[in-house]
Amino acid sequence: MTDWYPAGLEDDMRPRMFAAADAGQPFALVTIVAAQGGGPRGVGAQMVVTADDMGGFLSGGCIEADVALHARDVLESGQVVRLVYGEGSPFVDTRLPCGGRLDLQVERFTPDDPLLAALRAARDHRHLATLTSDQGRRDLVPGDVQRPDRLRAYAPSQRLIVIGADAFALAIAEEGARQGWETVFVRPNGPEAPPPVAAAYLRDAPAAALEHLGCDRWTAVAIATHDADFDHQAVKAALATDAGYVGVLGSRRRLPDRLDRLRSDGVPDDALARLKAPIGLRIGARAPREVAVSVVGEIIGARG
């Protein structure tokens, strides 16, 4: 590896898998299949290694370079290989400073492997699916399946829909995009020029935008319009969806009035119980980017 390894910031290896396949390159998929001790990564963490590149991390930099060497041997042999690092490992010169043990499975994928097409389809349709492998006999199973041959469950990518216009909304969208989340900025009747953040942009009313986008449990809706009517419309529409997170910016003092208005408009109490209001973790955030950090932290916590 180089002095810096920015590819270690990546967690979901599907983009690398698909990019390698699109380039006609075989790749080795490395998965932690058992872990003991207090290491930074757990079962299901992965790397992708090609003949000239690599991404992902398994140990915070302790073993990645050595893993890549073994993975490239697998690219040549096509054999499924188990590697052990830490306690009981034959690689005595490669240590885990945190102690414990990592068991890895390494296997070769070819660009035309039909499982890659199935994995793409699951991603595109936002379906949860589990990749299994028993000595190279691989399958993609719907849902999050707990089996001895489980490699990893691939959930739909986290999506963040920000409804608003001001600096707080921009900062929340910016922070979501920084996480690598699929981010959409909704500004009802907004300008034609898109916001200065890496996000898709819609100018629709909140209900229309959410209906168009569709919301599942991997979708978070953050509402920061500073307009009582738009906030009300957006919260009501968001709570009527399957969104896994719905939060609204605003003062705690105004919350009872907000809830009473929603109840009077037919929003049931079980739906109101899902609402995060005021939005974000209570960390004393005041500035827009501070609030954005608190919101992203709350979304991550809500995922369980």
Image (tube, rainbow, N blue to C red):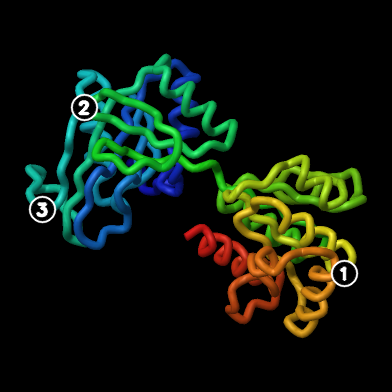
Q: Residue 228 carries which label?
A: 1
User: How far is the residue under mark 3 from the one under mark 1?
Assistant: 59 Å
Q: Position of residue 185 (x, y in %)?
A: 76, 50
Q: Residues within 10 Å of mark 2 (few under 14, many from 20)?
A: some
Query: Which sits earlier in the primary sequence, circle 2 or circle 1?
Result: 2
Q: What element carries label 2?
A: loop
Residue 198 seen in the current view? no
Q: Quadrant of residue 162?
A: bottom right
The amino acid type of the residue labelled 1 equals Ala
Q: Position of residue 49 (x, y in %)?
A: 34, 31
Q: In which quarter of the image is residue 99?
A: bottom left
Q: Residue 135 carries which label?
A: 2
Q: Which residue does the image show at 11% across and 48% down from the upper left? A: 93
User: How far is the residue under mark 3 from the one under mark 2?
Assistant: 23 Å
Q: Which residue does the image show at 72% across and 50% down from the upper left? A: 197
Q: Is mark 3 on a helix, strand or loop?
A: loop
Q: What element carries label 1?
A: helix
The amino acid type of the residue labelled 2 equals Gln
Q: Mark 3 points at which residue?
A: 87
Q: Which residue does the image show at 81% across and 76% down from the upper left? A: 260
Q: Nearer the viewer, mark 3 or mark 2?
A: 2
Mark 3 vs 1: CB contact within 8 A: no
Quadrant into which the N terminus falls: top left
Query: In the figure, is residue 221 to the left or right of 67?
Result: right
Q: Is residue 46 above or below residue 250?
A: above
Mark 2 vs 1: CB contact within 8 A: no
